[in-house]
Image (spheres, rainbow, N blue to C red):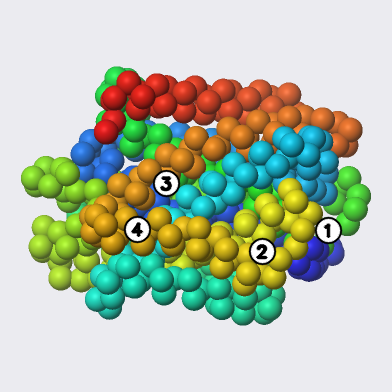
Amino acid sequence: MHQSVPIPMGASFWRKLLAFSGPGYLVAVGYMDPGNWATDLAGGARFYYTLLSVILLSNMMAMVLQPLAARLGIGAGRDLAQACRDSYSRGVSFALWLLCEIAIAACDLAEVIGSAIALKLLFGIPVVWGVCITALDVLMVLYLQNRGFRFIEALVISMIAVIAACFAAEIWWSQPDWRRVAAGFLPSGEIIRNPDMLYIAIGILGATVMPHNLYLHSSVVQTRKYMDTVPSKKEALRFATVDSTVALSLALFINAAILIVSAATFHNTGYQNVADIEDAYRLLSPVLGITSAGIVFAIALLASGQNSTLTGTLAGQIVMEGFLNIRLRPWLRRLITRLIAIIPAVIVAGLYGERGTGKLLILSQVILSLQLSFAVVPLVQFTGQRAKMGELVAPVWLRLCASIIAVAIIGFNAFLLWTILAGGES
């Protein structure tokens, strides 16, 4: 798909923006996948609107890191996985690849469980069977890749629009306290002091700023056929930044909407322990008094899970090909990744019942957060090297912001590990 999307020469700003739009939405899908639902639902039901500040902070981090990934792809002509293979020893590259595969498997686990739960809610299919059915989406992904990259982007954007419309309706029905909502976007020290709240907060961070999205973005921006000149690359970077910022703003709305609906519906009605997606589905309609509220919720969940499978496939191929320089057929690569996610999901659903899947969703997002620094640190390093980036080397202020984010992520994760080992979260 490299440089397969033509850019009209001499066209207006809006036509060029339309031509460059797409990669940002593929990346934004990872910021609203079923893993986000589990952490946002738990955060809203248990802690009201307090964790909205974490969602906002996570998206602000993403709005710095994702354009940085696009800068690497456009400026160096290499995705993050290829850049790691070029710069590090074989042993280091292999270790980074392994860590990234663990992150992708954790993300895929969330998609598998989310899609399976949606199938159960809408069609009554047991979760264990739904988990197995999701393995068949390899055929859909293979078909879409044969149709062309713009077709994939159009489908992804359409499903994002469905999710956004569903949650706009849910917010309207839940009638949140907008004064409390606004206050929730302000940081609170309680998040650090409360180990349970911190655990959910780190899960939100892991569900929002996903490590494999940095690999994905640095590659898919290269699908645009811009010229190999500095002015053309700078223009491509500007449009890629606008594309990702707009897409991530939409992801911010959806993430915040999930938490707001959960807080408004469950926190003050005696359902503060709602964390499972299925519980939220069953309670939405009776609590809100809207018959269709649960169905709309499940439709959005299914669209979210299926959307995530597309970007998960692309990220998996990019990571494996970039780090190991080997190519597998898309269906085989997806099947391998799916099996890695399906096995633990089937075991949990079989041994502990469907309620065990909620905790597994949140744990998968915490794993993503723990892997994040291993993608952010190389990204900051590479985009600051003039020898690799040329005229598109990241300015000092941007490298400083990204470095602060990297240190903050490492610090949050270290504190979380210390809290878990000390027995703060069972």
Q: Amino acid at mark 4?
A: Ile
On residue 364, the disc is 3
On residue 347, the disc is 4
Asked whether the residues under the numbered discs 2 and 3 touch, taking CB atoms below 8 Å apart as contact, a structural biologist would say no
| Residue 171 visible here | no
Q: Which is closer to the viewer, label 4 or label 2?
A: 4
Q: Which is closer to the viewer, label 4 or label 3?
A: 4
Q: Is residue 269 left or right of residue 388?
A: left
Q: Residues within 10 Å of mark 4 (few under 14, many from 20)?
A: some
Asked whether the residues under the numbered discs 1 and 4 touch, taking CB atoms below 8 Å apart as contact, a structural biologist would say no
Q: Residues within 10 Å of mark 1 (few under 14, many from 20)?
A: many
Q: Amino acid at mark 3?
A: Ser
On screen, 119 above or below 221?
below
Q: Which is closer to the viewer, label 1 or label 4?
A: 4
The numbered mark, 1 or 4, whose residue comes first in the sequence reads 1
**Residue that badge 2 annotates:** 18
The numbered mark, 4 or 3, whose residue comes first in the sequence reads 4
For label 2, the SS is helix
**Residue at point 32%, 55% (across, down):** 348
Whole-angstrom CA distance, mark 4 to mark 3, is 15 Å
Whole-angstrom CA distance, mark 2 to mark 3, is 35 Å
For label 4, the SS is helix
Asked whether the residues under the numbered discs 2 and 1 touch, taking CB atoms below 8 Å apart as contact, a structural biologist would say no
Q: Is residue 291 left or right of residue 371?
A: left
Q: Amino acid at mark 1?
A: Tyr
